Structures are given as structure tokens and as C-alpha cells.
Amino acid sequence: MAKVYVSSTVADLKQERQAVMDWLVEAGHQPVHSYRPDSKSVRDSCLDDVDTCDLYVLILSTGAAPSPRTVIRRGC
């Protein structure tokens, strides 16, 4: 099992982000994300969480379409 930090913009990639996180759980991994307020800055909180993870997944979009297609490769 790997701890996997999942990063993306939250509002516009919500479905894609959730699909990746669901797949990670199904594959036996532990998804991590840092969208919680606390006394530290969001940046510092995210960096601290990234330091504890084995892998980092960044979800990107071209911004050309309102709803990018999600592609998840099995067995990556």
C-alpha cells in the first residue's frame, strides 16, 4: 500500500479528482489531500502532507473544455 498525495484545482476537476481517489482506494492505496483549514498556511500544510507520501499525482486540465474526460489506466 502506498500513500498517494492527490493534487488538482478543486472546483473544476472535482469529478476527475474523485475518480482518481476512488480508484486508489479500490487498488489498496491511501489517498491524501490537504484541503483543510488549520493554524498553518495552506501551503505549509500541503507541503507537510506531501512529505509523508510515497507518490504524488497531479491532475491537470487544458482548460479548453468545461468538463475534461477522465482517463484512468489500470495497472499503472
Image (cartoon, helix red, strand yellow):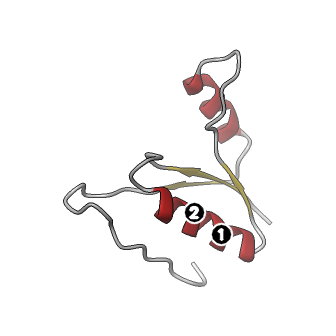
Indicate the secondary structure of the residue bearing disc 1: helix
Q: Is residue 68 left or right of residue 35?
A: left
Q: Which residue is mark 1?
A: 22
Q: Looking at the image, which residue is at 57% across and 67% down?
A: 20
Residue appearing at x 75%, y 66% in the figure: 29
Look at the picture and state if 8 lies above or below 21. above
* Circle 2 Cα neighbour tier, 10 Å, few/some/many (<14 / 14–19 / ≥20): few
Task: Tell me the kind of residue under disc 2.
Answer: Gln
Question: What separation in Å lies between label 2 and label 1 (alpha carbons)?
Answer: 6 Å
Q: Furthest-left residue in view?
A: 64
Picture layout, residue 1 above or below residue 5: below
Callout 1 amino acid? Asp
- The percent coordinates of residue 61 (x first, y second) are 32, 58
Disc 2 vs disc 1: Cβ atoms closer than 8 Å? yes
Q: Quadrant of the N terminus?
A: bottom right
Q: Nearer the viewer, residue 64 or 1?
A: 64
The circle drawn on residue 35 is none
- Residue 27 in picture, x, y percent from top left: 72, 76
